[in-house]
Image (cartoon, rainbow, N blue to C red):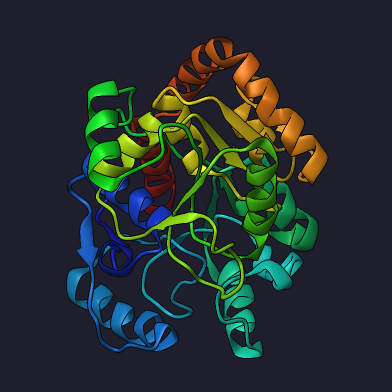
Amino acid sequence: MPRVAIDTRSLRSGPPGVSTYVSQLLKHLPWIDCLDSVRPTNNLLWNCVRVPIEQLRSRWQVFHAPSYTCPLIGFCPVVMTVHDICYLVHPEWYPYQKDIFRIFYYRTSLQRADRILVPSHFSLNEIKRLFPALKKRIRKIPMGVSSYFSPDQDLAEEISEKMNLPSQFILHVGDFHARRNLLLLSRVAKIVGLPLVLVGRPLEPGSVSESSLQLSNISKRSLKGIYSAASVFVYPSLYEGFGLPVLEAMACGVPVVASNRASLPEVCGKAAVLVEPDEEELVVGIEQAFHNRSHLIQRGLKQALQFSWKDTAEATLEVYRELSG
């Protein structure tokens, strides 16, 4: 096996999607070296000082940066995962700090990386459109869904009682910020007469309605129980590089309604009700999901099976071998 190291800071501090991605790569490729440290706290210095020093000591053949930025100097090839480029094409929807220096670092990292991993055709095409010279470096490797997520009615009842969940509710999982369209979802929930449960971290003030039930920092077991208890999962996001919660909901036997934007149609296939992210279409979509509930659940279970973390890891290993050979 090639000598590979991966940045594992996300396992300590998130974001949740990156943390899941890294943990699953390590589960299936356990021989990879983990590099985690709280210092330096500045991300640029961590990548451009800490990582090269560790590269010299450990003689890695490949370094994997799993989230948008990478070392600009170093002594081995760099693989970088870019989940989407919202920070460039829709900075108004990007929930993190986006000053000129940070955006410059993101752009420079893209051009520095020897291979760029993306989870969808959508993200691949977005990068190719803005950076056509990079197209030969890009590899599409979809994310997976853990076999842990499966329908579990007993757990649904346990978690519902423990967390005092409504008997029926609309569920959304994902951090709270503008592009997730949660204010729209709150209005739609009121129209259809169902409570709204939101699971995630608040990243932007004013991005969610106070009328929703908001849950943060919950365990994986609790999340599975909440998925299994939901009446319908609704994901009206305006821009996603993949949309992992959609697959997790499907794997737990929940009918899914999602927007027809960005990567969501390719991830959902024909297993979800896809709608324009506006009030009228979301209301109709939720009604369709209840009407075709059994059909959507069966399609969703089959769709989720097409996305395996084992396949993600094996395809990533081939990229490591390509660079280390």
194 or 51: nearer the viewer? 194
Seen in the image, is 263 located left or right of residue 22? right
At 46% from the left and 32% from the top, the residue drawn is 168
304 or 79: nearer the viewer? 304
From the top left corner, tell me how far across and down residue 106 is, in percent. Answer: 59, 74
309 or 283: nearer the viewer? 283
From the top left corner, tell me how far across and down residue 8 is, in percent. Answer: 28, 64
Tell how many labels: 0
Could you tell me which quadrant the N terminus lies in?
top left
At 35% from the left and 38% from the top, the residue drawn is 226
From the top left corner, tell me how far across and down residue 111 is, in percent. Answer: 62, 69
Q: Is residue 211 above or below residue 315?
A: below
Q: Is residue 72 above or below residue 149?
A: below
Seen in the image, is 140 located left or right of residue 236? left
Q: Is residue 271 above or below residue 175?
A: above
172 or 160: nearer the viewer? 160
Identify the image quadrant of residue 288: top right
Residue lying at the far front in this picture: please name it: 193
